[in-house]
Amino acid sequence: MAIFKRFEVWLLLVLSAAGIAFVLWSERKGGDGANAETVAPAETDGETAKPPAFQVRAVRVVPEGDGVVVEIELRGRNDDALPRELAAPAVKLLTADGAEVPPFFMPFDPPPALPPGGESIVTLRYWLKGAERPALSLQIAGEPEPLNVTLPASS
């Protein structure tokens, strides 16, 4: 075949093979800490309890179309080196009967996330259809207890 006699074709094939090998090798080598062992700190009677990583600061209900948008202002602490994304499936808003409340998103808004290295405030938005006001709890992955969310009385 005449196509394999051209220098450019061989150069392209070699560079493509090297790129594919690099991508496959670097993913396999990894460094995400998936195999790292985590040790929970031992609790002692003399120490004070560590404050919770998340706290509900405010809850607002905004009418929108045929339902309401529940805006939950959450104070959180992220001690990791990477941002912690607070979107489904890591964070779920559940009703008292266990049904999941769907998230509400604004076009072009990034998903809510806690920046690394300290405390910050983030707003989570969820959609409730109709005029229902059920008891809600916010479950965050990695947290032992769900946070209770109390909706304000409608005006």
Image: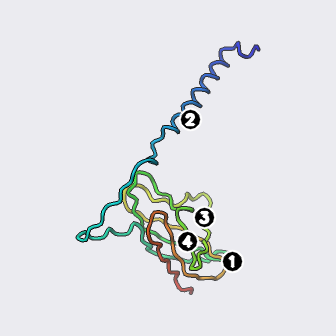
Q: Are marks 2 and 1 in contact (CB under 8 Å)?
A: no
Q: CA distance from mark 3 to mark 2?
A: 35 Å
Which badge, 4 or 2, is on the more N-terminal residue?
2
Residue on which the image places disc 4: 93
Report the amino acid beneath label 1.
Asp
Q: As rendered, which of 52 and 36 lies closer to the eye?
A: 36
Q: Quadrant of the C terminus?
A: bottom right
Relative to 34, is 11 above or below?
Answer: above
Q: Quadrant of residue 96?
A: bottom right
Relative to 121, is 69 above or below?
Answer: below
- Sort mark 2 into few (<14), some (14-19) or many (20+) by Cα contacts within 10 Å: few
- Sort mark 3 into few (<14), some (14-19) or many (20+) by Cα contacts within 10 Å: some
Q: Are marks 4 and 2 in contact (CB under 8 Å)?
A: no
Disc 4 is placed on an element classified as strand
Q: CA distance from mark 2 to mark 1?
A: 49 Å
Disc 2 is placed on an element classified as helix
Which badge, 1 or 4, is on the more N-terminal residue?
1
Name the front one of labels 4 and 3: 4
Report the amino acid beneath label 3.
Phe
Name the front one of labels 4 and 2: 2
Q: Is residue 85 left or right of residue 42?
A: right
Which badge, 3 or 2, is on the more N-terminal residue?
2
Residue on which the image places disc 3: 105
Residue on which the image places disc 1: 66
- The residue lying at 23 percent from left, 70 percent from top is 46
- The residue lying at 55 percent from left, 59 percent from top is 111
Residue 71 at x, y percent in the picture:
53, 72
Residue 78 at x, y percent in the picture:
40, 59
Q: CA distance from mark 4 to mark 3?
A: 14 Å
Residue on which the image places disc 2: 24
Name the front one of labels 1 and 4: 4
